Amino acid sequence: MSNNDKKQSLKLKWPWFVGGAIYGVFLRFIFDVIPSSVEGPMSAAFLIGTPLIAGALTIYGHRDQAMKVTRMIVLPWVTTLLLLLGTAIALLEGAICIAIMSPLFLFLASLGGLMMGGCLYIRRRNTKPLLSVTLLPFVILFAEGSIPLTEHQMQLTESVVVEASAERIWNEIVSAKEIKPDELPVSLSHLIGVPKPLEGINRHTDGAEIRYSIWEKGVNFEAIVLEREPYQRIKWQYVFNENSFPKGSMDDHVAIGGKYFDLHDTEFTLTPITTNKTELTIHASYRINSAINFYAVPASRFLGGDFMRTILGLYKNRSEK
């Protein structure tokens, strides 16, 4: 093949990159208007089928070339990144959802590329029937229509040693006022768009102790204190309503208290090590309810642990001042 042929061949690849991405954005729009009885963008049909197609179409577009396995793995990433960018430009997805789903989409796109590469190796002539892969999301949608979402009750625990007394830490927990951004350790959850806490204060109201929390972007919610042993442990249960997360504060699919994710309660435990050294432990219970729990569960553990370490860092920094 001459240099001109190689250049022409390289130019011909881009329609498949862009076309695969456009088809993915089209699927995102279609799944967004599907009746609510179907999980739409949160269905396995979209979340699994779409990146598989993106990868498969990318490699199909290179069927006239000898393809190494590494190229089958990497080239689909271009289509997938364009797809994700397209959903952001079209305001179909927010930064949080895109950041969370990117690893899954890139992996499945590579898998789709490898599968198409294998099919092309087996079927070297009359490859047009392989384009029927574009119907895969609808096949999956039909298959999963009668399968209910799987609910997982989860628990996370994180700890930190604080160079301060239990009493000092306790006071910081029950009255965290005027939280400044530089008081919070660097957190992946905040980098991808999760609002930062601004205030968390416990108040006694009508015989009950209520935790009032305010985050960035107008997020606000309450929690009822269930158990309280001063300077030792405190546990509260969250209460969310339709005003807790204003429109645009968080992506609808990952909003706390929503259909797919809910935070139940948080418990802080203070264990003295010495007079001015205390182990501070945070324990959180939450629910995951999705069609892709094989991915959502570990992703929630990773991001949840990251967020909890940020909260522990806040109380550690304030208590040690």
Image (tube, rainbow, N blue to C red):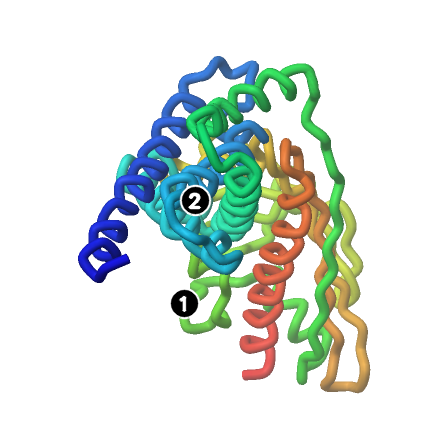
Dot 1 falls on a residue whose secondary structure is helix
- Residue occupying image coordinates x 64% and y 45%: 295
Q: Is residue 224 visible?
A: no
The percent coordinates of residue 62 (x first, y second) are 38, 45
193 to the left or right of 276: left
Q: Residues within 10 Å of mark 1 (few under 14, many from 20)?
A: few
Please state which of residues 292 and 285 is positioned toward the viewer in this rendering: 292
**Residue annotated with mark 2:** 59
**Distance from Cα at disc 2 to Cα at disc 1:** 45 Å
> Which residue appears farthest toward the left when viewing the image?
4
Task: Name the kind of residue labelled 1 in the image.
Answer: Pro
For the N terminus, which image quadrant? bottom left
The percent coordinates of residue 123 (x first, y second) are 53, 35
- Residue occupying image coordinates x 65% and y 72%: 169
Please state which of residues 245 and 16 is positioned toward the viewer in this rendering: 16
Checking the image for residue 94, the label placed there is none
- Residue occupying image coordinates x 57% and y 20%: 139
**Residue annotated with mark 1:** 181
- Residue occupying image coordinates x 44% and y 23%: 31
**Nearest to N terminus: mark 2 or mark 1:** 2
Q: Relative to 185, does residue 113 appear above or below in the rendering?
A: above
The percent coordinates of residue 131 (x first, y second) are 44, 28
Q: Are marks 2 and 1 in contact (CB under 8 Å)?
A: no
For the C terminus, which image quadrant? bottom right
Q: Is residue 28 visible?
A: yes
Q: Relative to 291, does residue 70 appear above or below in the rendering?
A: below
Q: Quadrant of residue 115?
A: top right
264 to the left or right of 320: right
Dot 2 falls on a residue whose secondary structure is helix
Task: Name the kind of residue labelled 2 in the image.
Answer: Ile
The percent coordinates of residue 56 (x first, y second) are 47, 39
Please state which of residues 242 and 303 is positioned toward the viewer in this rendering: 303
